Amino acid sequence: DQQVKQNSPSLSVQEGRISILNCDYTNSMFDYFLWYKKYPAEGPTFLISISSIKDKNEDGRFTVFLNKSAKHLSLHIVPSQPGDSAVYFCAASAGGTSYGKLTFGQGTILTVHP
Amino acid sequence: SAVISQKPSRDICQRGTSLTIQCQVDSQVTMMFWYRQQPGQSLTLIATANQGSEATYESGFVIDKFPISRPNLTFSTLTVSNMSPEDSSIYLCSVGFATSGRWETQYFGPGTRLLVL
């Protein structure tokens, strides 16, 4: 049962344009969401997070949007840079007895072309 | 955040043997976790490493296969026991920091790449 899904295995974007990465979830108990970036041979790097009490969170070039009714979140990167090329994972947490446990999506490979 | 190191960074092992992976953090942390990323798959939580008590394992993972130690607030080990080729994965430790009272913002080590022949 894949509770967090990233349906696009890959995304290709031109440098300077917007990258939009999408994530869907099925567990209505999830109330905290995170995005991680992973380069080959490295561990995931935390990018940005959002609580379910918000619908948007911004940090520099990165913005995460949360649509609770659709159980959907997205990560916008503007402007995209070649150094952003990596695998992006969304993750979710339910709190309560699942406190601290992250459920990850399958990842989306982002390629930003110069 | 924290600086997290793992040893070894990679290893090739024979089936039936065991490997112990170490995770060291440069500051005291309350929450430490162990994850596995199988080839082409996402990250899956193996267990929460609890300081001073037994680890809490997720469904599908058992202590006999993945014994975990957490002797203090900066160090943990994960052992992959009686290995088979299906254990070939990247094993990652992570630490959790409170963000607005929640522990879910986790930071990851570089991972240990394990190949079992």
Image (cartoon, rainbow, N blue to C red):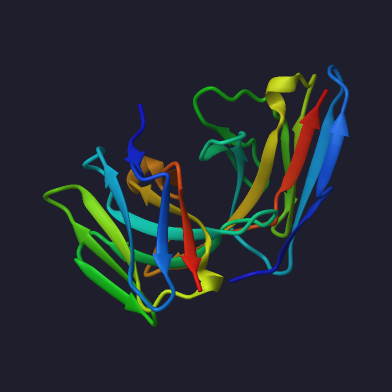
Q: What residue do we see at 81% from left, 50% from top?
A: B9
Q: Splitting the image into 4 quarters, where does residue A59 fall?
A: bottom left
Residue B41 is situated, as x and y percent measured from the top left of the image, at 53, 36
Could you say where residue A42 lies in the image, as x and y percent from the top left? Answer: 67, 57
Q: Is residue B84 visible?
A: yes
Foreground residue among B60 and B57: B60
**Total numbered labels:** 0
Q: Tell me the residue at 37%/65% (across/down).
A: A49
Residue A39, image x, y percentages: 61, 59
Relative to A25, residue A20 above or below: below
Q: Where residue B112 sits in the image (x, y, percent)?
A: 75, 45
Q: Is residue B54 above or below residue A22?
A: above
Q: Height in image: B66 above or below A50? A: above
Q: Is residue B64 visible?
A: no
View extreme (left): residue = A69
Quarter the N terminus of chain A occupies? top left
- Image point (19%, 66%), residue name: A55
**Residue B48 lies in what quarter of the image?**
top right
Foreground pick, B28 / A69: A69
The residue lying at 27 percent from left, 43 percent from top is A25
